[in-house]
Image: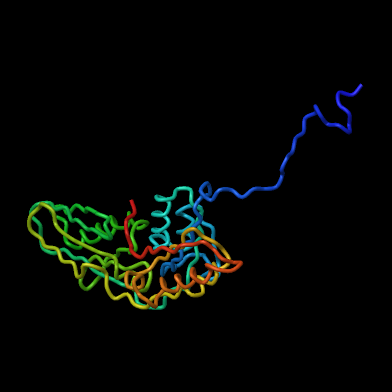
């Protein structure tokens, strides 16, 4: 005998299984971001303008664009704010321009040991200057100390000649190097003097053009579009931030509309 007639399902049990995929709440999704930053002068292995590279670590960004690159610094800051974010990297065409530079110099003979304090983009680097060490020896030592922070700084240090000094060189051509702030002082000790030629690096010229790079990401949607710019470019009404604003505004209607925002990271800085 049947518990229930096939024609009459009562008191049987009915189950309905809906296998249609559902959209996930945006609030539960990781932030998707893209960083646009030109390569260092020494370069990397990313294809400029046309490659969208997924980067999973700081090392990935450095391989693509170089150590101390503005994109690498922006990546570190972004991961501090959004640890689980998904990040792409696009590198505009390398800048054809002049690289910003600056120099630091000590002189004299000291009679008591000093701490030479060098601050670059907020990163404090203390270098001991011992009695018996010449100015040239201190310059060479300082270059080594600064080199330990090359992943945090948008410049490199070398020993300049004629005169002997610490030469700071931005990691890429362009005005972004002009935004690297520098201070130089002696703490404690006796004898000797210090001189810094500039409060910031100077001489960087020619802004990059992000037009083609922005066209490359046109088919993708990001929660954040991060631009690595010079201070001057960031406030320009006809520069790359303006181009990015046009890019986002042009995609806010129609079937291909995207909900996006663009942010500016335009300074060499020590994010941690």
Q: Is residue 22 left or right of residue 141?
A: right
Q: Is residue 253 left or right of residue 158?
A: right
Q: Is residue 266 left or right of residue 87?
A: left
The number of callouts visible is 0
Instruction: Classify 94 as above or below 267.
Output: below
Q: Is residue 204 left or right of residue 163?
A: right
Q: Residue at x 10, y 52 (%)?
A: 188
Quadrant hosting residue 119: bottom left
The quarter of the picture where the N terminus appears is top right
The image's colouring method is rainbow
Quadrant hosting residue 129: bottom left
Depth check, front residue: 28 or 6: 6
What x and y, as percent, mark residue 51? Answer: 55, 66
Q: Residue furthest top?
A: 1
What x and y, as percent, mark residue 208? Answer: 42, 74
Instruction: Classify 221 as above or below 163.
Output: above
Q: Residue at x 89, y 28 (%)?
A: 5
What x and y, as percent, mark residue 42? Answer: 42, 68
What x and y, as percent, mark residue 8? Answer: 86, 31
Q: Residue at x 39, y 58 (%)?
A: 73
Instruction: Classify 57 as above or below 42.
Output: above
Depth check, front residue: 21 or 242: 21
Instruction: Classify 3 as above or below 256.
Output: above
Depth check, front residue: 145 or 265: 265
């Amino acid at each position: 005998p049947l518990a229930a007639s096939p024609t009459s399902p009562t008191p049987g049990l009915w189950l309905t299984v809906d296998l249609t995929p559902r959209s996930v709440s945006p609030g539960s999704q990781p932030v998707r971001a893209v960083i646009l930053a030109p390569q260092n002068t020494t370069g990397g292995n990313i294809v400029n303008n046309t490659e969208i590279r997924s980067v999973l670590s700081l090392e990935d960004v450095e391989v693509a664009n170089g150590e101390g690159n503005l994109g690498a610094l922006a990546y570190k800051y972004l991961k501090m704010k959004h640890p689980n974010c998904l990040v792409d990297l696009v590198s505009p065409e390398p800048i054809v321009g002049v690289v910003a530079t600056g120099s630091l110099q000590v002189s004299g003979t000291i009679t008591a040991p000093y701490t030479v304090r060098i601050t670059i983009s907020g990163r404090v680097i203390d270098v001991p200057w011992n009695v018996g060490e010449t100015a040239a020896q201190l310059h060479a030592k300082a270059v080594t100390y600064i080199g330990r922070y090359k992943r945090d700084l948008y410049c490199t240090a070398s020993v300049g000649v004629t005169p002997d000094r610490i030469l700071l060189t931005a990691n890429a051509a362009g005005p972004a190097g002009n935004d690297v702030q520098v201070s130089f002082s002696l703490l404690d000790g006796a004898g000797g003097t210090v001189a810094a030629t500039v409060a910031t690096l100077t001489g960087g010229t020619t802004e990059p053009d992000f037009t083609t790079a922005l066209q490359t990401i046109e088919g993708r949607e990001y929660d954040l579009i991060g631009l690595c710019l010079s201070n001057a470019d960031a406030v320009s009404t006809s520069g790359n931030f303006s181009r990015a604003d046009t890019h986002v505004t042009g995609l806010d209607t129609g079937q291909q509309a995207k909900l996006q925002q663009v942010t500016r990271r335009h300074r060499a800085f020590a994010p941690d």
